[in-house]
Image: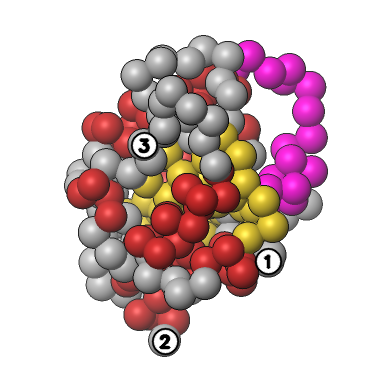
Amino acid sequence: MARLWLFLTLFLVSSVYSLKELELEDIVEKEYTTRSVDYDDETEQQARFSNIIVTGWPEEKGRQENTMAVVYRIGRRLKFNRPLDDVLGARRVNLRLRDPNVPRPIVIRLRSPIKRGQWCFAYNTGDHFKQKWYLNEHLSQHNQKLLRDTKKWAKQHGWKYVWTRDCIVRIKKGDGAGAEYQIKQREDLDKLLVLEVNAHSNQTQPLSNDK
């Protein structure tokens, strides 16, 4: 079951993380740069731990949008029969540096991390990205930038998979039973260049020191 979950949640850097999604992430990242650098990343990530963020979903113009109705449509697209039963609240994110031609992201607060995992799983096992909308875990400022840096690094160095699970950035060299690594800081990527992968180990290997 663990291997099935891993297979279904891995993202191919060259395909699923498309140029369009990177552009949408760039908009969110620009918003982060306007915030104070003096903040507690762990507290921010904990506050977002049950959240998902949807980018690229069309926004109604010319009238006030019912955000919960939008969330209902998203949930039905993911084949949940009663999607709002999982939802505590939702809002569009008002970005300071906003392109009026790009829909504002939607942050959806779910009832638990388990529900968050179910929504992410439902999205990842479909082909929804082909419709140019994307659903991901709601990462902290630090982890959002780290995910973007890791995807760029993976393309440059030939690593095939980059994804997040439980709001932790993870990377894997390729198919098969190779090791899966947690990336908790930018320096962890540099360590991968000199680290030997144990071919017989398929367990998650933390590179950063746990605090």
Whichever of callouts 3 and 1 sits on the residue coming sooner in the sequence is 3
Residue 1: assigned label: 2
Q: Identify the residue position indicated by label 1 in the image.
A: 112
Q: Nearer the viewer, residue 54 or 141?
A: 54
Inspect the image, locate mark 2, and give the three-letter code of the amino acid beneath it: Met
Number of numbered callouts drawn: 3
Question: Which type of secondary structure does the marked residue at label 3 adopt?
Answer: loop
User: Residue 176, can we see it?
Assistant: yes
Question: Which type of secondary structure does the marked residue at label 1 adopt?
Answer: loop
Dot in front, 3 or 1? 3
Separation (CA) of disc 3 from disc 1: 26 Å
Q: Identify the residue position indicated by label 3 in the image.
A: 58
Q: Position of residue 151 (x, y in %)?
A: 36, 39
- The extreme bottom residue here reads 1
The residue depicted at 57 percent of the width and 50 percent of the height is 68
Q: Which of 101 and 23 is in front in this view?
A: 101
Do labels 2 and 1 touch, CB within 8 Å? no
Do labels 3 and 2 touch, CB within 8 Å? no
Q: Where is residue 137 in the image (x, y as percent from the top left)?
A: 53, 51
Q: Where is residue 58 in the image (x, y as percent from the top left)?
A: 36, 36
Q: How crowded is mark 3: few (under 14 residues within 10 Å), some or many (20 or more)?
A: few
Q: Give the extent of the magenta segment.
A: 33-50
Inspect the image, locate mark 3, and give the three-letter code of the amino acid beneath it: Pro
Task: Examine the rendered structure and indicate whether residue 15 appears above or below residue 86.
Answer: above
Residue 43: within the magenta? yes
Dot in front, 3 or 2? 3
Q: Quadrant of the N terminus?
A: bottom left
